[in-house]
Image (cartoon, grey):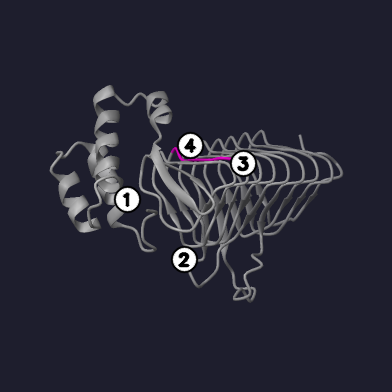
Amino acid sequence: MIHESAVIDPSAVIGKDVSVGPWTTIGANVKIGDNCNIASHVVIKGPTVIGSGNTIYQFASVGEDTPDLKYKGEPTRLVIGNNNTIREGVTIHRGTIQDNGETLIGSDNLFMAYVHVGHDCVIGNHVVMTNNAAVAGHVHVGDWSILSGFAMIHQYVSLGAHCFIGPAAFVYHDVPAYVTVSGSPAEPRTINREGLKRRDFSVEQIAMANKAYKILYRRGLRLEEAIRTIADLGDDPVITMFIDSVERSTRGIIR
């Protein structure tokens, strides 16, 4: 299942039932789990750990050194979970010692063509990044987030779970959970109602998320006042996640 023209470093560890296409290069200190499908002309550099069931399409570059000027060749790594789809031309860089030294990718994610994931990013699970979306270094992306085509996320930004980033949006500040943003610079628009429906949130939970959004963005309250008012809605996990995503912000939330 490994094409004869593939170049695989002797130190690389390849799991069971892995297919590797022609002219693919797998470098030193790469570990690939079982049942992965790696197409032709892929480059995987280490140290990189890739879980099981991943599919990597042609011309993807996975685990390359970051172009960050602070990077001086230190031993950093990329860790990828299970069942991810990495489409054509995707680039994913390893971390830097200025952060935790790792770029972390969860499981069940879809990275469409020409997506870029910068150094030290942390991508959750079930994330969709559409064609040409890009996240700069140190970005955190919560579970079930969707980034539309050509969306660009500034370094150190955090995107909350279930958020939706509109096409060609430029995001400079943190986005709370459930929030839809669009524009350049991006602005909050509403909650990701359709996404929550698809993930089986109840009508009551969606209404609660919408109420929290309106308290934060429509009443003209100071942030501390808005958080206290939202907390009065109760301790439902929807409210807890929303408040946590706001309180964890280090760059300030988008407003």
Q: Are marks 3 and 1 in contact (CB under 8 Å)?
A: no
Q: Which residue is mark 4?
A: 126
Earlier sequence position, callout 4 versus callout 1: 4
Label 2, label 1: how many angstroms apart (C-alpha)? 21 Å
Q: Which residues are magenta?
A: 144-149
Between 233 and 83, the residue placed more toward the observer is: 233
Q: Are marks 2 and 1 in contact (CB under 8 Å)?
A: no
Q: How many marks?
A: 4
Q: Which residue is mark 2?
A: 100
The residue mark sitting in front, 2 or 3, is 3
The residue positioned 47% from the left and 62% from the top of the image is: 156
Q: Quadrant of residue 242?
A: top left
Q: Which residue is mark 1?
A: 245
Q: Main secondary structure of the magenta part?
A: loop
The residue positioned 63% from the left and 76% from the top of the image is: 72
**Magenta region includes residue 169:** no
Q: Crowdedness of circle 2 by 10 Å Cα count: few (<14), some, many (20+)?
A: some
Instruction: Tell me the amino acid under the disc marked 3.
Output: Gly
Label 4, label 3: how many angstroms apart (C-alpha)? 17 Å
Earlier sequence position, callout 2 versus callout 1: 2
The residue mark sitting in front, 2 or 1, is 1
The residue positioned 50% from the left and 53% from the top of the image is: 104
Earlier sequence position, callout 3 versus callout 1: 3
Label 2, label 3: how many angstroms apart (C-alpha)? 28 Å
Q: Which residue is mark 3?
A: 149
